[in-house]
Each structure stands twice: as C-alpha cells, then as structure tokens.
Image (tube, grey):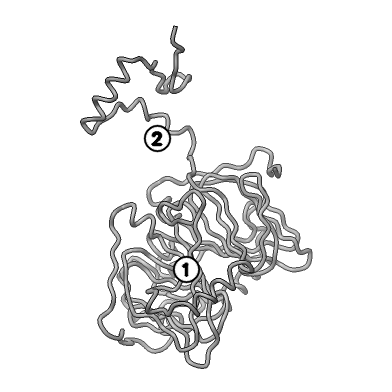
Amino acid sequence: MEETKYDDTVYGRARVQTTPELEAYYKELESLGAGALWTVANDIEPWEPKPSSVPMLWKYEDLRHLVLKSSELVTPEQAGRRVVYLVNDKRRDVSAAVGWLYTGIQVTRPGESTSAHRHKASALRFIMEGEGGYTVVDGNKIMLEVNDFVITPNSTWHEHGVEEGGKTCIWQDGLDIPLVNALEANDYAVFDGKQPLEKPLNFSPMSYSGAGLIPADHVWDKPYSPLFKYSWKQVYPALQQAAQVNEGSPYDGVLMHYTNPLTGGHVMQTMGASMQMLRPSEHTLAHKHTGSFIYQCAKGKGYSIIGGKRYDWKERDIFCVPSWVYHEHVNLSDTEDACLFSFHDLPVIESLGLYQEKAHPEGRQKVE
C-alpha cells in the first residue's frame, strides 16, 4: 500500500491525504491559474512569524577600502549613486539587507555632488566619517557631521555632496526600496537643472531641534518629520542624561527613538530609527519581536547574540536582526558605554497592527 502523506498532523491544519486523483486535480487547477488552498495553507499561515532573512554582520574594516576604491573607479554621475550595498544571503533576489529593507555605504569626495533626484522609496543616512558633507532636501541645505542621522522622505528632491576643502565623507544609506518595489509603487526622477536653495543654511535643524520648542509661525502639513537632521551633539547628551535617571529596557538598555517633533511619532511613514546606549559591561536579556532591524555601532565595542550565534562588533560595523529572531546585546567595556544606531520598519508593522514581542523563556540564549 502507498504511504499516506499529510501536509500537517495537527487538527485544524491542512492534512489532506495525497492521491493520484488529487494530483491530477491539482494539475488541472494549475493549468487554469488556480490552486487548492489546503496545499499551501500551512506554509502561508505559520504558527509564528517566519523570517526569510538570516542574521548577518558586515565588518567595516573589511569593506572600507573597497568603498573608497569605488571613488577611484566611477564618478557619482556615472554611478547615479556610488554605493556599495549590503545584501542578506537569503534576500539577494530583492537586494535587501534584511526583510524588506535595503542598506549600503556611500562615499563622496571633496568637491563632488550628485544630481538632485527623488523616488517613492524613503531614505535615510547615518554619517560614518568625513567633514564638510551636506545634503539638500527640498531646497533645504544641511551640513552633516559624524554620527548625525538624516532623513530624505519619499518624493522629496534631494542631493548630497562634500564642500571643497572638506574631507571624504562616508555614510550609511537606508531605504525601503524592497518594500516599495514589492508593492509595485516605486519610481525615480532626476531634477532638471540645479535644485534651488529655498531656505537659509541649516534651516530645518535650527528651526525644530531646540529644547523641544516648535516654531509657531511655520505650517507643516506633510506626513514626515520637518526635522531633516538629528545631530549627534544633541542625541548623545540626551542618552547620557536619560541613563542617569532611568534604568532603561532590560532588552535594549537606554533606548530612544528619533521622532517627528510635531507628532512624537516616527520620522517617516515606512521607516523609523533609534539610538540605544549600553552601559559599561551591560548584558541585556534576550527577546524577539516582529519588525526587521539594521544596526550600526556608533560608539564602543561589544557583541550581539542573534538566533543563538555571537556576532562581535565595534565602531562602524553593521549587522542585522531579522524579524522574530531572539537577540541580546553586550557591551564589552567595563568603563565606557556603547551606542548602537538602528533603523527599522516599525512604522509599517505598528500601523498595520502586526507588532508582537516575546521574551526568551530562559532570559538569555545559549551560544551555538
């Protein structure tokens, strides 16, 4: 007798016995562009969230010389965007670093600039090194410094460059290109001519980032933050002050989100960003949650245990935590704090009611 095969053995799940008659039925449905739900139900409706990405670590010391070499091989105009992108081993088909998020490392030399362009995908930057770098977003020119966080919301005209006399700048790009492409909603356009400057230099950060005050004479009706740059000079002291009066999260240390100063919500509709501080020798507890995260070490050194495997990081290293994978973080210094920048898709996850979280039953993971 032919062995009985089931798709699943649990009551309430698909467990239809395979027969030659059913196989013929399935082929007939397939020829008509249809199918039997019970043949795929257990795959498309898992018991728990099922990530398609794997944890990965990209060491900056291994990549930096290749990033710089790109500036010798192609110009910004030739490349459009001169970027070395980071790709997840399980997401190469959509050029994603984790989940539906893209990231890359961009280099710009003194005197170089890109043509102004825009796209439906939202973008962000985290500045890694250099001096004299700038971005222009919808006519607002903003100067950049190391560890500054910058947004370029979807459909905004934007360009980047480094002033003459500056130093070569390198920054991390983050975009939701894979998500917007999956929704079949992306586009791209290049500005005709030179983007005019409509505001004084550093207008956005000087108008909106001071002491929690909001200018009363400005009207802002756009769905993203009017503060295009979040300065490290303000962010790091805020973390230090918070650490003095708060215990922080047992899973993330002192964690703070970059927000829209007008709403208190995420900086953009599809991507958010955070900065967290791990106190000296801090070892967080492990948890997992929905939402994909890409981290960069902004200060210090340590390691993260992701899915039971240890990933050591130091300043400028980049790593990812896929959705619904246990993770915990450790600061290796017993005298200095460590800071991790991250960006993520929580605005999408939360707005669709898809966020869930689970603590590790044993507190921390065993390292494989």
Mark closer to the chain start, 2 or 1: 2
Identify which residue is drawn at 21% across, 31% down. 32
Residue under label 2: 44
In the picture, the disc for residue 364 is none
Mark 2: give few (<14), some (14-19) or many (20+) Cα within 10 Å.
few
Identify which residue is drawn at 41% across, 79% down. 76
Mark 1: give few (<14), some (14-19) or many (20+) Cα within 10 Å.
many
The one nearer the camera, 54 or 198, is 54
Residue under label 1: 173
Identify which residue is drawn at 66% across, 47% down. 309
Q: Amino acid at mark 1?
A: Asp
Is 227 placed above or below 55 here? below
Identify which residue is drawn at 58% across, 62% down. 318
| Quadrant that contains the N terminus | top left
Is 58 placed above or below 362 here? below
Tell me residue 13's x, y (percent).
42, 23
Is 153 placed above or below 56 here? below
- SS under mark 1: strand
| Quadrant that contains the C terminus | top right
* Residue at mark 2 to residue at mark 1: CA–CA distance: 32 Å
